[in-house]
Amino acid sequence: MSLQEFVPTPRFDEYRETFAEFFTLDRRDDGVLLAQAHTRGGPVQLSVQNHRALGQFLKTVGADPENELLILTGSGEEFMMDSDPAGFEIEEQQLEYWAYEYAYKDGRTNVSSLVNDLEIPTIGLFNGSGFHPEILLMCDLTLCAEDARIFDVHYGISSVPGDGIHSCFQELLGVKRAAYALLTGQAIDARVALEYGMVNEVLPRDQLIPRAYTIADHIMSQPRTVRRLATQIIRRPWKKRIVDDLDGGFGIQMFGHLAKGRSIHSREHIASTTDYVRQGRPNSFD
């Protein structure tokens, strides 16, 4: 008998409650986990709090050996189009501290955890339009609602687009298309996203989760070790990309953040740059 015991792994019933304010979780008996991000039951409203919770959640899911596949999506008819009205107050009060804690550390953790801490297949579902699309685009497979539009908000709110979305767009779109999307705030509709290779399928919103479960059933038909090792092959391009780009991009963005000396995440500021997406315009300046 060993002189030491294993440290207990996370228990689903416990972390389902821990993260209930941020994710609605449902896990089948075979380990397929559906996580629906939300703010009070509706679309995600960005905040320092849910930004941090994402990385904590992904690490916890990855540390539970009973999870075998993650389906990650949002709630309602939009993915993320607003910020929490008070979600950045603590950043404004202690900008230098939170520029590191929120913008640099938590942001890098979110992207790297998705790629490195989850050794299970992942399926991202765009339930509707939203910024911070990298969390769904960098899943192994991505399905998209037919009326969703994908875009990066950062340049439009006077922020350097260097927080991982740039890495995601450059990997999926190539240099020229990525530059255009990052500088113009191009709202890429679902069909164009499919044409560009950003997403794998476009479906009516109410068919996204059933289709994800169908794909999950196929993936789950192979042995556990095969599924988990397959992710190491599939994710190699992402791992190389984030090693090359992520820390430097975040560092440049954080420098710009501190140089301005003010927060740029207010609800009004973000809303002023997302209205064009809701209005169906192609770019922030058209």
Image (tube, helix red, strand yellow):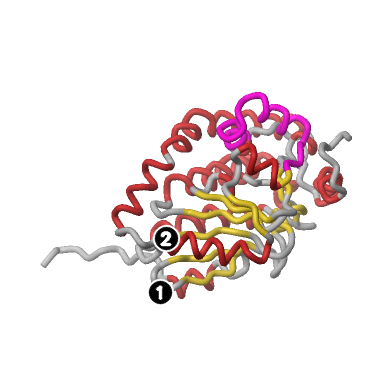
Residue in front for this viewpoint, 123 or 88: 123
Drawn side of residue 126 relative to residue 117, left or right: right
Percent from the top left, x then y, of residue 201? 60, 51
Residue 36 showing in the rendered view: yes
Q: Nearer the viewer, residue 238 or 116?
A: 238
Residue farthest to the left, as pictured: 1
The stretch drawn in magenta includes residue 169: yes
Q: Is residue 73 left or right of residue 190?
A: left
Residue ID at (40%, 66%) = 10
Q: Which of the two discs, 1 and 2, labels the residue nearer the N terminus?
A: 1
Crowding at label 1, few (<14), some or many (≥20) Cα neighbours within 10 Å? few
Question: Mark 2 sits on what residue?
Answer: 218
Vertical comparison of 185 with 252: above or below: below
Q: Secondary structure at mark 1?
A: loop
Q: Which residues are magenta?
A: 166-188
Q: Main secondary structure of the magenta part?
A: helix
Identify residue type, mark 2: His
> Looking at the image, do the residues carrying marks 1 and 2 touch, with CB atoms under 8 Å apart?
no
* The quadrant where residue 74 appears: bottom right
**Residue 182 position within the rendered picture, expressed as x and y whole percent measured from the top left:** 71, 32
Question: Identity of the amino acid at label 1?
Answer: Asp
Quarter placement of the C terminus:
top right
Mark 2 neighbour class, 10 Å CA radius: few under 14, some 14 to 19, many 20 or more: few
Distance from Cα at disc 1 to Cα at disc 2 = 16 Å
Q: Is residue 179 magenta?
A: yes
- What residue did someone put label 1 on? 29
Q: Position of residue 6 (x, y in %)?
A: 25, 64
Residue ID at (69%, 47%) = 190
Is residue 9 found left or right of 205 in the rendered image? Answer: left
* Label 1 vs label 2, nearer the camera: 2
